[in-house]
Image (cartoon, helix red, strand yellow):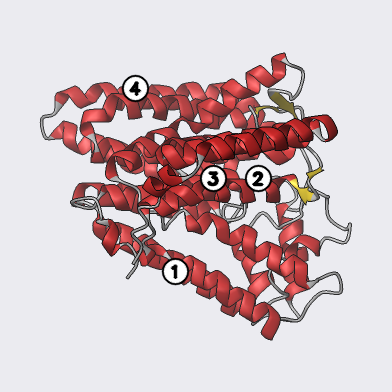
Amino acid sequence: MTNFEWGSKLNVLPYGMLYLMSALFFGTAVIYQPMIAIAAVLLIILLGISISRPELISYFVLITTAISINFLYDGSMFGMEILSLYKLVIVMLLVPCILVNGLRFRLSHPLWAMVALLVITFGSSIWLPEMTSSIAVKAFIGLSIPFVFLLINWKKNVAELQIKIICMLPLVSVVVGLLLQLAHVHNFLNIEYTGAVRIQGANIPAHLAMLAFMGVAIPFIEVKRNPQQARFFYIMLVLNFFILIGTGTRGPILALGLTVLYYFYDILRQYLKGRTYLLIPLLGAFFLIVVAVFWQLDNFEKRSFERQTDTAVDLSGRSEAWEYFLNKAADSPWSGRGLGAVTVANDGTLYKGFVVPHNEYIRFYFDGGYIGAILLMFSLLAVFILVYRALAPPIKPYYLLFIAAFLIYSFSDNTLSTVQFIIPFCWYLNCLYRSSQPTDSPQKEVIR
């Protein structure tokens, strides 16, 4: 049971002494280590906000996922890789949110699966020569952190606003990307070796596509769940759809195919029952798809058919990578090569971009074997089922299609190990679950 009520206890702190000590510390730091002082001041400001208004810091943390910081800053800070430092900082910032709102472990199954993968790693996996204990622990922490976002017991009104923010993340990335382009820091567009021109915003095209995938899939659910907010979610759906098409990323577009087909069926079925006003969104959706096809047809042809490969469609090296990783895992099929081993498996045979195989089923089979991969998949299914049971009947078909799209998308990209997908994905599942509860969960029942 967690009922911290610790925010009020800060009132007893001797603020005058605290301010004096802080001023002395930062005055000295500015002279000797100005960059560290600036970073520390910013961190303290954020921590102060997170204590006084934890929901505000949650919005800030969520918005930061719209930016692929590891591609904007290539290097380390304070002796840590920038992406690892980013994950550490967001966890630190969310600690007050956790203390104020509490945790609820109903959706904790993936965390326990990650613990099991770590046990398998040190107990029975056959390690590659390049594998080390630090790689395993680092991978465990990095892969587990996003699943913590399934546990925070957000209030319903906060969860509803967070859902809207998730839908706006692709637009945030595009706006920040334009600003970075104007500042000559990062290119807004990415021009491939094939000649295809792809929007990337403040990310790389694949990461912006992940954000846009969420920004398209979620409004289908939310229009059904919150019809009074339908205008906002339809606008987000249209904007995110064009952003997704503009990235030129094929995997998420194909993954959303079933959802789009069901939407046409659902709208047409209601129209035939006499709801004639639905003719407008029906024709509008058809028009948008036609425009998107003509806009991006040349790009998709360049990416899919211009390069000669062993497959009918150019998979951008995925087929070779999948075969390579499967062959390397063959010596330890049941317990894998160890958590994180996939990140050191590419010996230079593959293109350097394949640090992981761009297929999450192969990735976790490589790391945890059949046992680890099946445990993780079943843990995710347990979460999906719990959320499904909390939903009203009209919402369930779109939710199931959302999960199906995620499972399809995971065949061609790193959905569980990329910040721009897994954090918004887990965050949304949690918010959807909290928002579908009849009332806010009382804090005294947070941990059972």
Tag of residue 335: none
Q: Earlier in the sequence, mark 2 or mark 1?
A: 2
Q: Residues within 10 Å of mark 2 (few under 14, many from 20)?
A: some
Q: Secondary structure at mark 1?
A: helix
Viewer-nearest of labels 3 and 2?
3
Q: Residues within 10 Å of mark 3 (few under 14, many from 20)?
A: many
Front residue of 108/388: it is 108
Q: Is residue 49 found left or right of 327 in the rendered image?
A: left
Residue farthest toward the top in the current orientation of the protein: 182
CA separation, marks 3 and 2? 11 Å
Does residue 157 sit above or below 380 in this rendering?
A: above
Disc 4 target residue: 284
Does residue 226 sit above or below 141 in this rendering?
A: above
Q: Residues within 10 Å of mark 4 (few under 14, many from 20)?
A: few
Tag of residue 86: 2
Q: Earlier in the sequence, mark 2 or mark 4?
A: 2
Q: Earlier in the sequence, mark 4 or mark 3?
A: 3
Amino acid identity at mark 1: His
Residue farthest toward the right in the current orientation of the protein: 348
Decide: marks 1, 3 in contact (CB < 8 A)?
A: no
Viewer-nearest of labels 1 and 3?
3
Front residue of 100/365: it is 100
Query: Considering the image in quadrants, where does the N terminus appear?
Result: bottom left
CA separation, marks 2 and 4? 40 Å
Q: Secondary structure at mark 4?
A: helix
Locate residue 17, reporting x and y percent: 57, 39
Disc 1 target residue: 109
CA separation, marks 1 and 3? 24 Å
Amino acid identity at mark 3: Leu
Disc 3 target residue: 93
Residue farthest toward the left in the current orientation of the protein: 274
